Image (cartoon, rainbow, N blue to C red):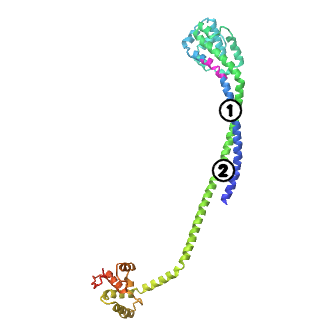
Amino acid sequence: TDCEELLVEIVQDKRVADEQEKQVNAEAQKIGKEAEEANAIATQVQAELDKALPVLQAAEEALNVLTKKDMAELKAYAKPPGLVELTLGGVMTVLRRPPTWDEAKKQLGDPAFMSKMLEFDKDKLDDGLLKKIAKTTQNPEFTPDAVGKVSLAARGLCMWVRAMETYGYVAKDVAPKRAKLKAAQENLAKKQAALKAAQDQLAIVLAKVQALKDKYDDSTSRKKALEDELADLEGKLERAEKLVTGLAGERIRWEASIADLEARMGCLPGDVVVASAFMSYAGPFPSEYRDELVKQTWLPQVKALHIPASEHFDFALFLADPKNVRDWNIQGLPSDSFSTENGVMVTRGRRWPLMIDPQGQAN
């Protein structure tokens, strides 16, 4: 009954779990497609941004070779060359500082000036700032080669300003795609969170179903073990009944044997007395005289003394081992009672016997 109830519960819960699993898998496929679309947008955005990387890397390399000595050289100008002043003005514009020489000298004196440029957040280059930067970069003389002829230090700064502008326009072009990517990623994250919750819930249901299955399997195995044990016990009972039935006929014989043994045990005192006399004195006499001694002399005297003894005492049967007698017969001793009595006296007696044996039967 328990197994049947468990089976019904397993079927019901499995049906619920299958339906949930179907929904979760469908949602997972849908989210997988959305994730592929988001990844495609991200790849496209990154590919367009990567177009500006060579310019940025060249600018960063140019900045990395600048030293404090180069900065000091630029700062030392009381009246800087026009292209140097134009370059520093462009740098200040990018850094959202006043594009004046005084501000530039002030910034050049800052030990962290180079770090500010290298760590500048390029993604904050908006339209307004790009328009201001364009006022500098649109000057036909504002090129790395032209600036480098006046000052090598200013050449790296020029490259940096142009790189910032290039990246800014690229970022501006991909801004809608970035916004779309961000929205897609946020939506994807929400759906993935919902999917994770559904998967967790499904895992709980599946774990419950599995626990019920394990319990059902355990109950089934225990039921099978009990059924096997019952079948084994029934088989044993059936065999026992057959054995008891088969031995019922032996009961009468066993009861008769018990009664006979009890009677013989009661007669042991007299039988032992007669057997002792037979062992001690009957050896030299023939069979007829031995019978006469037992039946007409010793047994009447024993009974007269009220010593219980067997009515038909037989010396050979009383002291002989049937196995030994059979061995004697196999080796040539005749099977008559007289020869058996002689064999018993020879093997049971404590004194050396004198055997008159012309036939050679006492070997």
At which x and y percent is residue 290?
34, 90
Q: Tell me which residue sits at (58%, 15%) in the image.
A: 62
Q: Describe residue 270's horizontal placement relative to residue 166 as left or right.
A: left
Crowd tier of the residue under label 1, counting other residues whose Cα lies within 10 Å: few below 14, some 14–19, many 20 or above = few
Give x and y (percent) for residue 134.
Answer: 69, 13
Q: Nearer the viewer, residue 307 or 75?
A: 307
Label 1, label 2: how far apart the Cα atoms are: 34 Å
Q: In this view, does 145 lie above or below 227?
A: above
Q: Considering the numbered disc 2 on the image, is that residue within a helix, a strand or a loop?
A: helix
Residue named by callout 2: 209
Q: Is mark 1 on a helix, strand or loop?
A: helix
- Quadrant containing the N terminus is bottom right
Question: Disc 1 or 2, which lies upstream in sequence?
Answer: 1
Q: Is residue 352 magenta?
A: no
In the rendering, at what x and y percent does residue 239 appear? 56, 71
Q: What residue type is labelled 1?
A: Glu
Vertical relation: 44 (above or below) 296 = above
Quarter of the image with the C terminus in it: bottom left
Q: Pick the residue in front: 97 or 34.
A: 34
Count the labels in the image: 2
Residue 192: horizontal and vertical position, in percent?
Answer: 68, 37
Image: magenta residue range: 48-57
The residue tagged 1 is 36
Residue 44, above or below 274? above
Q: Residue 207 or 356: which is nearer the viewer?
A: 356
Q: Residue furthest front?
A: 359
The answer, for residue 185, to whether it is visible in the render is: no
Crowd class of label 2 (few under 14; some 14 to 19; many from 20; radius 10 Å): many
Main secondary structure along the magenta-highlighted residues: helix
Within the image, what quadrant is residue 79 found in? top right
Foreground mark, 1 or 2, reads 1
Amino acid of disc 2: Val
